[in-house]
Image (cartoon, coloured by chain):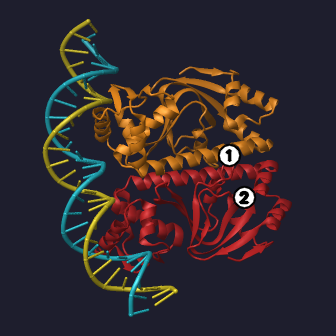
Chain colours: A red, B orange, C cyan, D yellow
Amino acid sequence: MNEVKYVCDCKECIIRNLIFKHLRSEEFQEVCRSKTQKSFKKGQVVFEKGQLLEHLIYLKSGLVKYYYSTNEGKVNIISLSIPFDAFSLLTILHNEQISIYSMSVLEDSTLCYIPLSLIKNLIHINGDFALDFISKLIETSNKTIEQFLTLHNKNLRGRVAYFMLYLSDNIYKKNIFELPVSRKEIAEIIGMTTENVIRTLSEFRKEKIIKINGKEIEILEKERLSKISQYG
Amino acid sequence: MNEVKYVCDCKECIIRNLIFKHLRSEEFQEVCRSKTQKSFKKGQVVFEKGQLLEHLIYLKSGLVKYYYSTNEGKVNIISLSIPFDAFSLLTILHNEQISIYSMSVLEDSTLCYIPLSLIKNLIHINGDFALDFISKLIETSNKTIEQFLTLHNKNLRGRVAYFMLYLSDNIYKKNIFELPVSRKEIAEIIGMTTENVIRTLSEFRKEKIIKINGKEIEILEKERLSKISQYG
DNA sequence: CGCGGCTTTGATGTTCATCAAGTAAAGTGG
DNA sequence: CCACTTTACTTGATGAACATCAAAGCCGCG
C-alpha cells in the first residue's frame, strides 16, 4: 500500500465526473496539490464502519465494494463501485465524519484521497461546485435505494440474472468477464445464501443461458437472462 | 386543498431543522415571502413518480409516506415522515427534477412549498447553508439505506416488532397509538404480505405482547417486543 | 502434503406467499 | 337512513420458495 503525494493527473476525473466540472483553475490546482494517492491489493480493507473519515475517497482504477455489517455480524454489500463512481460521497457523514459503511478492494485498485476540509471549503466558496456535489449525492443515493428495491422485489433466479446483467452491462461492458467476487459475496449483494447462488448459477448453466468456468462467466442468451431478471 | 401564500410562521422550522440554521436574516425573509402552504386530507396524493418537482416540499404538520412503485405495479413504502423530517430532499433529482418517488398523506397534513430555484440560489450564495443542506441529505440517505438493511435482515416477526417499536418510539412517542396505516400498507413498508402482517399481529396479541383494538395498538411488553425485533 | 476456505450437490425442514372463504367496517346512492 | 357495494380485516389450509444441514471435491498456500 504505497502512498504518493502531489500527483496531478486529475484531468481524467474532471472530465469524467460531474462533481469537479465547475472548479475554477486555481481551485483545481489546490485539489491536486492536496490530493494523496494510495494503491491497494485485492482483498484489502480501505476503511471500516465506525472509522473517522477525513478524506473524500475516490476510486481511480480498480473495483471496490461498500458493505455494511449488522450487529450480529451479517454482511450486506451495498454497492460495487467502478472508477469515478460517487458512492463514497455517502460515507461523509454530517458533522462527525464517522462512516456507517466499510469499504474493501475487489481488484487491485488505486484510490485518491482529497481532504474533506478542502471539499468543505470548496462547497463554501464555489456555489456551482456545491450544486454539482448535491446533484451527484442525490443521484447516488437514489440509485442505491432504487437498486435495493429492484433486487428485493425479485425471486432468486431474478436476482442472480439481474446481477449477472449488472456486471456485464455496467461494470465490464462485455459478455465474457471474470467474476470479481466470490459466490459468497454475490450472496451478500443480492441477499440470499451462498448455496442458492451456486444452485441458481448451475441452473442457468444447464439451461445454456450462461457458460461457467470457475470465475469466468459468459452470457450466452442475454435475452432470456433479461426476461428472467425482469419477471423474476 | 386550500393554498395560502406569504405565510411567515417559519420560525419553528428554523429552530427545529438544521438546514435553515445558517440562513441570514434577509435570506430567511425571502424564504418566507416565496413560501406557499397547502393542506391535504388523509389519503390525498401530493406528487407522483415521474412528476416534475419545482419546490422543496416540507411537512409542517401531519404525517406522510414516500413510496416507490415498480413497473409491475407493486408498491414499496420507503419512508414515513413526520414534520420537519428531511426525506423530501431526496426527491429533488439532479438536473431534471423528476422524482422517482411518490408522496401521499396518511393524516391530514399541511405542507410547505419552497421554490427549488430559491433553494438553489441559497446554496449558491450561502456556503454554510450548502453545508447544512448536504449534511442533512447524507444523514437522510444513510438512515433510509440503513433502515432497509435492518428490516430485510429480519424475519417476519422481527419486522412487525421493529415497525411497532418504530411507531411507538419515533412517530408517536408513547405506548398507545392509532395505526396511521392499513395492514396492507404495513405490508408494503416491511416487505411482506398483508395476511402475514395480520397473522403476526394476532400472534403478538395472543402472546399478550400487544393489545389490538382495530387501529389502536397498545404495547404491553416492550422488552419482549425489542427482543423479537432484535433477534428476529 | 495436509489444512482451511471456497465450491458444488443433494436431502430436509422452515418460513413465508398464495389461495380460499368468511366477517366486519366503511362508503355510496336512492 | 337503509340496502348495496366495496374495501379492509381475519383465519385456515396448502404448496412453493428458500434456508439450513450434511458431505464431498477442489484449490491455493504454508
**Helix, strand or loop at disc 1?**
helix
Q: Residue A231's x, y, as percent?
A: 34, 57
Q: Is residue A199 above or below residue A95?
A: below
Q: Residue B23's x, y, as percent?
A: 77, 35
Q: Is residue A81 above or below residue A214?
A: above
Q: Toward which corner of the image does residue B189 lie, by quadrant?
A: top left
- Residue type at mark 2 is Glu
The residue to which callout 2 is attached is A54
**Helix, strand or loop at disc 2?**
loop
The circle drawn on residue A215 is: none
The residue to which callout 1 is attached is B135
Q: Residue A164's x, y, as percent?
A: 43, 68
Residue shown at 45% from the left, 36% from the top: B165
Q: Is residue A220 above or below residue A129?
A: below
Q: In the drawing, does residue B70 fall left or right of residue A87?
A: left
Q: In the drawing, does residue B170 fall left or right of residue A18?
A: left
- Label 1 or label 2, whichever lies nearer to me, is 2
Mark 1, other Cα within 10 Å: few <14 / some 14–19 / many ≥20 = some
Q: Are marks 1 and 2 on the same chain?
A: no
- Residue type at mark 1 is Ser
Q: Residue B131's x, y, as percent?
A: 73, 45
